Image: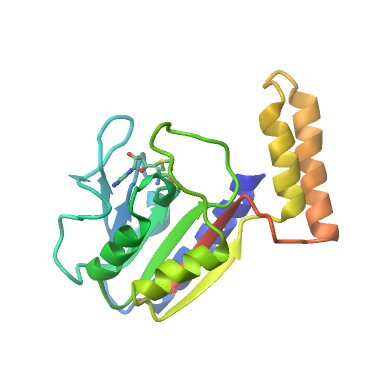
């Protein structure tokens, strides 16, 4: 359910960034690319994945999100999904993503507000929308749009699902659907599981 929201928000951010990019073949940097789940959204682009490790990921370049080994203004679009919580210095990462973007370039960033510990012990932060806004301002981005990936009901039932044993398939499916329906009836967004952001340099 969360991925359904996340996927929709990422697709919409990518489509807006591609529409507004003037480059013939936009250069796209995926920072903390893992196994590049969104690469297919960038057909016709020069798409380059950067990751700190090639263990369980498939980067084109090995490098840190706080020291990306490309020159200033290299990219038309920088995308970084579910990485920022793993970076000890998130402001340094957002500043670095700003540095490698062309003026007018787009930064697509996603990260959690609520999610259980993962990739331990390299799981350092959770973010509010004001925290993200603060980082973007500090890094000199000129504009941004922050979207919740689901509402409070989705997050509530996601928490229940994460506690339940994987064997409870029917109950989990039911709770997932209930979260989706209740979100539609009453979309409260003070406690989403995740945020998706489209920012402009
Ligand atoms: C949860 S995975 C997300 C992978 C992918 N972006 C996705 O959405 O599926 C986090 C990724 O960030 C990478 N990573 C963690 N710290 C990093 C850093 N400081 N610099 C670059 N990549 C980093 C990890 O190696 C891992 O591939």
Question: Could you tell whether 158 is left or right of 18 in the image?
Answer: right
- The residue located at (37%, 76%) in the rendering is 141
Q: How many marks?
A: 0
In the displayed structure, would residue 194 be above or below residue 132?
A: above
The quarter in which the C terminus is drawn is bottom left
Q: Would residue 132 be seen by someone viewing this image from the given angle?
A: yes
The structure residue drawn at horizontal position 45% and vertical position 48%, both measured from the top left corner, is: 82
Q: Nearer the viewer, residue 40 or 85?
A: 85
Picture residue at 53% right of the left edge, 73% below the top? 145
Q: Quadrant of residue 146?
A: bottom right
Q: Nearer the viewer, residue 169 or 95?
A: 95
Looking at the image, residue 52 lies above or below residue 163: below
Residue at screen point 37% across, 44% down: 36
Measuring from the top left, give residue 19's x and y in whole percent.
Answer: 43, 75
| Ligand 1 quadrant assignment | top left
- The answer to whether one can see residue 44 in this image is no
> At which x and y percent is residue 65?
28, 52
Q: Is residue 198 above or below residue 42?
A: below
């Amino acid at each position: 359910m969360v991925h359904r929201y996340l996927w929709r928000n990422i697709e919409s951010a990518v489509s807006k960034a591609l529409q507004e990019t003037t480059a013939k073949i936009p250069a796209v940097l995926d920072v903390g690319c893992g196994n590049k789940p969104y690469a297919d959204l960038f057909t016709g682009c020069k798409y380059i994945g950067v990751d700190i490790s090639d263990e369980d990921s498939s980067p084109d370049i090995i490098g840190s999100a706080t020291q990306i080994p490309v020159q200033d203004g290299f990219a038309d679009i920088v995308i970084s999904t579910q990485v920022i919580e793993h970076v000890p210095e998130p402001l340094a990462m957002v500043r670095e993503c700003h540095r490698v973007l062309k003026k007018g370039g787009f930064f697509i960033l996603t990260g959690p507000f609520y999610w259980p510990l993962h990739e331990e012990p390299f799981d350092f932060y959770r973010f509010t929308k004001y925290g993200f806004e603060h980082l973007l301002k500090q890094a000199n981005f000129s504009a941004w749009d922050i979207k919740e990936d689901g509402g409070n009901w989705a997050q509530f039932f996601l928490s229940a699902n994460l506690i339940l044993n994987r064997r409870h398939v029917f109950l989990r499916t039911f709770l997932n659907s209930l979260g989706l329906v209740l979100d539609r009836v009453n979309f409260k967004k003070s406690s989403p599981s995740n945020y998706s952001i489209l920012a402009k340099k």
